[in-house]
Image: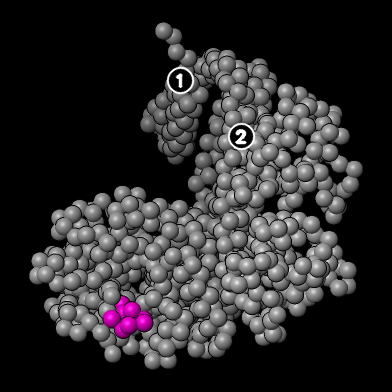
Amino acid sequence: MFFAPSTTEVKVCCNRMHFTLLENFRKAQEDRIMTGEEGAAHRISYRHHKILVEIAYLVLIIVAGFTVGINLVLLHETHQTIIAKTDRHISELSASVSNSLAQRFQRTLRILESVELSYDQDGILSSTELERLHERADLLQFEYFAFISPDGSAVCSDGVSRTFSQQAGIMKAFEGQAVIDVESSKTETDEQILNMPFFAIPIRSHGGTGEITGIFAAPVSPEQEDFYLVQSYYGGNVFFNLVKPDGTEIFMTTHSHVLPVDEPQNSDKQHNLFDTLDANVEIISDTSVDDLREAAVSGRNATIRFHLPNSSSTQTGQLSPISDTGLCVWMVDTDDAVSEGIDQILHIAFRINGLGVVCFCLIITILLFLYRKNTHILMVDPVTGGYSLSRFTQEAERLVRHSNPGEYTLIVMNIVHFKYFNDTYGSDESNRILKYVHTAIQKYMEDGEILVRSGADDFNLLIRTSRNSNEVIIQKLELMVDEVNRFNKELPKKEWIMFRVGVYQITDTSLSVIHMSDRANIARKKPKIPVGDILYSCGFYEEEDLAQLQKENILVNKMNDALENHDFKMYLQPKVDISTGKIVAAEALVRWQNPDMGLVRPDEFIPLFERNGFIRKLDLYMFEQVCACLRRWLDEGLQPVQISINLSRVHLANKDFLKPFIAVQEKYRIPPELLEFELLESALQEFPKALPEAVCQIHLAGYTCSLDDFGSGYSSLNNLESLDIDVVKLDREFLNTAHTEGDRGHIVIEELIHMARRLGITVCCEGVETVEQLAFLQKCHCDKGQGYLFSKPVEVSVFEEMLFGNSQIK
């Protein structure tokens, strides 16, 4: 059987040719500095390689031409198969979107029901109650809450009087069912508010069992609309709207492509899907517009294919019902996005077929030209157009060697979260950002000062300074950072570029640039307060920093022996039932008792171990200590309590991280419900996909999972919904905020606890230190508390005396 070479093989061939040319021109470069027979020999070798390049060039053209022909045949055969799968793919995608929206709508209605049950059902509220109700609407991301009377008049939490008597969709809630609609509402000044997504439920007397006395409704805030409607796929070529059974379109797409209508695209008038199809498109499928109408009313799926006027492209529409809502998803593949790429490839491939040989010739010619300028490539950064790192290193060492101590300073500037720009804008745009940053910084570089992009998102600066010139350096940095962010002045939505900066004033001119950069990076990474502006933080290298680095090296050298010698001790801190005061659980915390250094604080070694990965071994070690303790309690006939173990975010990089933990648990025969893993909420920012998967694995193994430090800086109410956690641990800052902000702080905690309990999540509050805080948590019906009011972390023997001697903390 005969096999044609694949496109991958052609690329490999190109890469090999690329490498061969590089070697040839390196040798040609060497020829320039050689004389006599040695240089002549290299020139002969170069001519020999040139002949080989020409032969490879011809072979490459033949292989490429043959491969193109084979690929054309294969593309033609696969095209028909892909077209057949398009309709099914759109149908499945539409069904998936429909199911997802149904679940989200139902969750919102349940939230609305829980809020309605908390207030007077006749809608008569004082101004204070209305204010608190509106604060609750803001917290839950609704525009406002409204109590609607049978005559359509409404009392709204934002203080604006509205009437909904003409809003038939919303008034249907008086028939006894929850309503999801998009209608316009009027204020007393007849101000029109269009396209407001409304959720409405009936209000019944006698605790929800009597007759309907009103409607409780709320529109979704504009910031939350995207949560309910993802509007496009495949780069905007596949989009969807929501429609009523009569064809009225709601939640109109923001995509630039819409079906042609007489009104402008931004008109306030709601369009009817079926009327638009009747008037503007040519149906090319067996399904008619009347069939769509029937499907919308009966709640069935329907697929239709059509052409737009003056267009030959085929569009596919899919109508899918959303269960329990009376709404439908109308999804449109505007130009067969799933299969259109194949058509384009076929057309392009036919045109490329005749130009293939020419293109490859041009590629080889360009490569030859580029490699003749390899010296330029080695000396210039291809992204910024400035110095390459190699050139910077050479030039910096030359300048420093001929200078006095303190005359030069090396600065390292790291762009904070540059991965965000990469993920958001792509690598090409990110490279343009790097070039822009380089240009902005360069404006403030003086003669005898040099700049380089030293890493993916790092810049090294060598500037002239004098001793004790920190203020001058800060002023210069502020000018540079301001210049970098100058583009933000005219933008309504700011995209700040922030920096972490490390400064090393070069007092030892014998150091290499690498060692100078290391010292600047030590200063950049050490804890510090932002200097001058939130757009950058700056650390200055001090000799103590080197001492800290040396201390960390000592800890690194001792860590393995400490693990083997059991120098890491397990301490337990009780978790107490807020209502009874009994110990119901504990958290395992690690302490390092070093024979030479004494007690090493956790904040001295935990961050270090997370950076070097040793935390994986330490977490597993602590887990085994917990299992051994529980096993001893069980063997002695004692009634154990659940113990939680902190799980570092470092584990999340390995999808099989839980296997060794399960092996230890099975070794000690510990019931999994006695074990709980605590995950930091902040890990969700670094591992948005891995963290939910880890929670799922933990549950599959039978363990409990808690979200630690909720509210420490990355909190989102969506996290409570998106993560299937069992326990949420409120950060101690929540209690501090409640103490300083009064009623508003209390409202936040009350609502968080209320919402968590509604979601079936246990709430444990950390940092309980005063009797007043305990009383407040009891009032809020918080489940558990943990803090120095009950007990500090103690040795296992002390905890056992507390638990089994007297399990109630006064």
Where residue 730 sits: x, y (%)?
Answer: 43, 75
Please tell me whether mark 2 sits on a helix, a strand or a loop: helix
Q: Residue furthest top?
A: 1
In the image, what residue occupies the spot 45% across and 53% down? 689
In the image, what residue occupies the spot 60% across and 23% down? 84
- The C terminus, quarter of image: bottom left
Where residue 131 sits: x, y (%)?
Answer: 67, 81
In the image, what residue occupies the spot 76% across and 70% down? 149
Q: Please tell me which residue lies in front, 738 or 159.
A: 159
The chosen color scheme is one colour
- The N terminus, quarter of image: top left
Q: Are marks 2 and 1 in contact (CB under 8 Å)?
A: no
Which residue is identified by label 1? 52
Position of 73 relative to 198 (above/below): above
Position of 391 relative to 334 (above/below): below
Residues rendered magenta in the picture:
575-582
**Crowd band around label 2 with a 10 angstrom C-alpha radius: few (<14), some (14–19), many (20+):** many
Where residue 445 sits: x, y (%)?
Answer: 60, 68
